[in-house]
Image: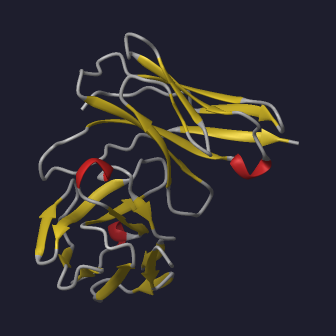
Amino acid sequence: DAKTTQPPSMDCAEGRAANLPCNHSTISGNEYVYWYRQIHSQGPQYIIHGLKNNETNEMASLIITEDRKSSTLILPHATLRDTAVYYCIVRVGNAGNNRKLIWGLGTSLAVNP
Amino acid sequence: NAGVTQTPKFRVLKTGQSMTLLCAQDMNHEYMYWYRQDPGMGLRLIHYSVGEGTTAKGEVPDGYNVSRLKKQNFLLGLESAAPSQTSVYFCASSPAGTGTYEQYFGPGTRLTVT
């Protein structure tokens, strides 16, 4: 699986958009980009995933560059409850019985009032 | 719909004691996972299961055993606890097919081994 690089920490003002970058320059054609977040002391929560098209759901938007070497998770109107560690993970979509996700240290997002 | 639940939430063990962590899911998911999370490290996969009666080793399986006798339950056992197993343990489940990596996590079990 491709390695991902994320900044260790970011700040965002409440009500503003939070843009969390992820670099995955060695991504291959059949690898998806997944985003999860983990609020302090809770289990991780799935946010969104994509292959090459931009994706949007009720939680966030995922923008993947045309060359797929990087992506950005956008929280359009960040709230204090969005303070969490955000993980970007790259994984092959269909990998037989190997269901392993490789978790890095993610980006610690602090949303400030 | 409770999602993924874990029992117990907290536990303190002495070195050499044994215990079983229980994970239950009510989403009819095929796949289930046990992870551990330590300070300064990402989640690491201990064992996983792709269906009732089947289990497989993850990244850090030593010192743990698992069983999946029923589709909705996945048990993690520590036969002889060691201080190195002090950690937060998370269980997760996911559907088969294209949703496999949309994993749903439980609230975690905080285990301390003294």
Residue B11 point in image, percent of width and height: 47, 84
Q: Quadrant of residue B93?
A: bottom left
Say whether residue A27 is left or right of residue A5: left
Q: Quadrant of residue A14?
A: top right
Count of labels in the image = 0
Residue B42 point in image, percent of width and height: 41, 48
At x 42% / y 48%, what residue is drawn?
A: B41
Q: Quadrant of residue B95?
A: bottom left
Please identify the quadrant where the N terminus of chain A is shown. Answer: top left
Q: Name the residue furthest right.
A: A113
Residue B80 appears anywhere in the view: yes
Say whether residue B12 is left or right of residue B57: right
Say whether residue B58 is left or right of residue A61: left
Q: Nearer the viewer, residue A93 or B57?
A: A93
At x 70% / y 47%, what residue is drawn?
A: A83
B2 lies above or below B36: below
At x 50% / y 78%, what residue is drawn?
A: B1
Residue B96 point in image, percent of width and height: 24, 58
B2 lies above or below A6: below
Residue B75 appears anywhere in the view: no
Residue B113 point in image, percent of width and height: 40, 78
